[in-house]
């Protein structure tokens, strides 16, 4: 029987603070969320200049990536190409995020542990900082599609 793994609070804190450091190096601010594999929020931060709604968007990005095991960008592109539907992925169309900024979190053995999301910048910049924080904490931000 397989062993289930999940992101710990300490690991989520390390990822979240890694994302914050990445943002600060670029002199920008955003909202950050890190969730475990079950979608439970373990780290959330809305930096001072982040727009209010971005806290919810960052959380939705993190939860979607934890649920699917894919980046929010990949899911959006896959749906746009007709390769998948929100229903097939068991995602609610009302909260579906189709743009970059959310990434899954894997350990080095390929186990899905959770997801992280950033919101407030251009979508590609959100993803850049999410990826930096995940890697800085020693985790893997994607699997082969």
Image: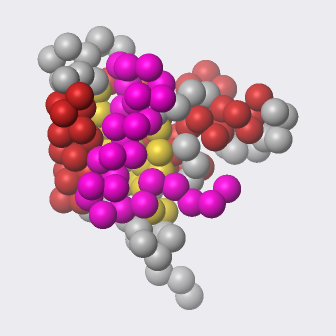
> Which residue lies most toward the right here?
82
Residue 142 relative to residue 119: left or right: right
Residue 140 relative to residue 52: left or right: right
Q: Which residues are magenta?
A: 118-145
Residue 57 relative to residue 17: left or right: right
In depth, the one of 42 and 22 nearer the eye is 22
Where 55 sits versus 21, above or below? above
Quarter location, residue 126: top left
On whether residue 124 falls in the magenta region, the answer is yes
Q: Position of residue 75 (x, y in %)?
A: 65, 39
Question: From where the camera sits, is residue 2 visible?
Answer: yes
Q: Residue at x 20, y 53 (%)?
A: 14
Q: Residue at x 61, y 28 (%)?
A: 98
Q: Position of residue 135 (x, y in %)?
A: 34, 56
Q: Residue at x 52, y 55 (%)?
A: 142
> Which residue lies most toward the bottom here?
1
On whether residue 91 falls in the magenta region, the answer is no
Where 42 sits versus 85, above or below? below
Q: Residue at x 20, y 50 (%)?
A: 13
Q: Position of residue 43 (x, y in %)?
A: 24, 43
Residue 76 relative to residue 133: left or right: right
Question: From where the camera sits, is residue 12 visible?
Answer: no
Q: Position of residue 105 (x, y in %)?
A: 43, 56
Image quadrant where one finds the C terminus: bottom right
User: How many tags in the picture?
Assistant: 0
> Which residue lies most toward the front here?
26
């Amino acid at each position: 029987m397989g062993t289930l793994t999940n992101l710990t609070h300490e690991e989520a804190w390390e990822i979240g603070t890694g994302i914050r450091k990445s943002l600060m190096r670029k002199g920008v601010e955003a909202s950050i969320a890190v969730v475990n594999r079950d979608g439970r929020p373990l780290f959330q931060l809305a930096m001072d200049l982040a727009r209010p709604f971005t806290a919810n968007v960052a959380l939705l990005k993190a939860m979607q990536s934890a649920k699917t095991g894919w980046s929010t960008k990949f899911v959006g592109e896959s749906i746009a190409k007709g390769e998948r539907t929100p229903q097939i992925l068991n995602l609610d169309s009302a909260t579906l995020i189709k743009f970059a900024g959310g990434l899954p979190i894997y350990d080095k053995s390929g186990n899905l542990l959770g997801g992280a999301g950033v919101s407030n910048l251009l979508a590609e910049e959100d993803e850049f900082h999410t990826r930096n924080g995940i890697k800085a904490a020693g985790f893997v931000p994607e699997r082969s599609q």
